[in-house]
Image (cartoon, rainbow, N blue to C red):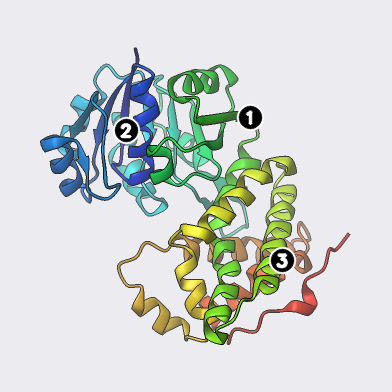
Amino acid sequence: MSTITVIGAGVMASSLSFPAVENGNEMRLTGTPLDREIIDSVKANRYHPTLKRTLPEGVKAFQVEELDAALDGCDAVILGVSSFGVDWFIENALAKIPDKIPVIAVTKGVEVYDDGMVKTFPELFASNVEKGKSHEFCAIGGPCRCYELADHDDTRVAFCGKNMEVLEFFKKLLERPYYHIDLTQDVAGLEIAVALKNAYALGVSLGIGLEEKQQKYMCNTQSALFGQSSYEIMKFVQYMGGNVENSIHGIGDLYVTVMGGRSKEIGKRLGAGMPYEQAMEELKGVTLESVVIARRAAKAVRILSEKNQIKKEDFPLILHIDDVLQHGSMLDIPWKKFRVNE
């Protein structure tokens, strides 16, 4: 049996308690300052009010002030914060993790710097480890709705990291007959693909908004946007030195997100003709990682194209999305620019 400490009691990390406990492990679910009600509920009766499931026996709950106790003697850490919680994790929790303890994150996203450099979250975490300590940072990517995982529906994901032995360790902790895990050392390929899916879910859902506005099925439009999104994800992975084959996990995740994720909500409204500011006002309080990653991806494309490291012509959809989000442009899907540039 291993002891796994989860930092961040969001729905995705919490759903991993099912395979973890079923494999005989102890799960210590630790909240952030935003998770107090969740942790209070789990402490009382193991019910997770956001996941809407009772967590299995073997899950112990800890408030953020109890993080030191939750980490004491643990064998592994699962990072469960959203991309908006990454700074909090680096500033308040990373240094508390005991030396040599491996970390695997469900957090999806990338950082983009003013020189165009794209850094995955495992790379970002590794660069912030205090001197004298070391951790192997891994990540989970692929199509996975937390509710379905908790209900034991067949799910296929990938774990990425630089150390295959550590990846095998995490696979042993979490793989179940319904939770199928690929392993890859291609961190850039997997992480970039699954991060971009949030941005392109916004793009595909423009077609859903158009459909609702015109009150008729528009599968052709949506599938064309899905195809262009898949193409741009693969090109981005290729430019960043990743294995294009690992784009399948991001493309699969794109499908899941369009079908049932939060990221489609802003795209639906824009597709229906709603101004961006009004759409954001309607969605106030909703976590919209799609907007953040779309801006970051477009920023990288613009900077790297100026350096002749990337072809701007390969990314017409994400650049138009960025124009709508940041520059007040009216939605006008650039169909004529959608082509395979080889």
Q: Quadrant of the N terminus?
A: top left
- Residue 337 occupies which quadrant of the picture? bottom right
- Give the residue displayed 50% in from the left and 23% down from the top: 171
Is residue 117 among the parts visible in the rendering?
yes
Identify the residue at the far top of this view: 1
For disc 2, the neighbor class at 10 Å (few under 14, some 14 to 19, many from 20) is many
Q: Earlier in the sequence, mark 3 or mark 2?
A: 2
Asked if the residues shown at circle 1 and circle 2 are in contact, with their CB atoms under 8 angstroms apart, the answer is no
Q: Earlier in the sequence, mark 1 or mark 2?
A: 2
Q: Which residue is mark 2?
A: 6
The numbered dot on residue 315 is 3
- Residue 278 occupies which quadrant of the picture? bottom left
For disc 3, the neighbor class at 10 Å (few under 14, some 14 to 19, many from 20) is many
For disc 1, the neighbor class at 10 Å (few under 14, some 14 to 19, many from 20) is some
- Residue 160 occupies which quadrant of the picture? top right
Name the one closer to the observer, 151 or 50: 151
- Give the residue displayed 22% in from the left and 51% down from the top: 34
Left or right? Give the position of 280 relative to 320.
Answer: left
Q: CA distance from mark 3 to mark 1?
A: 26 Å
Asked if the residues shown at circle 3 and circle 1 are in contact, with their CB atoms under 8 angstroms apart, the answer is no
Q: How far across and down, in percent of the image, does residue 272 sit? A: 52, 83
Is residue 161 among the parts visible in the rendering?
no
Q: CA distance from mark 1 to mark 2?
A: 23 Å
Q: CA distance from mark 3 to mark 2?
A: 37 Å
- Label 1 secondary element: loop
Q: Which residue is mark 1?
A: 185
Task: Check the image and report above or below for 65 versus 313.
Answer: above
- Label 2 secondary element: strand
Q: How far across and down, in percent of the image, does residue 324 sit? A: 56, 79
Q: How far across and down, in percent of the image, does residue 116 sit? A: 63, 57
Name the one closer to the observer, 195 or 144: 144
- Label 3 secondary element: loop
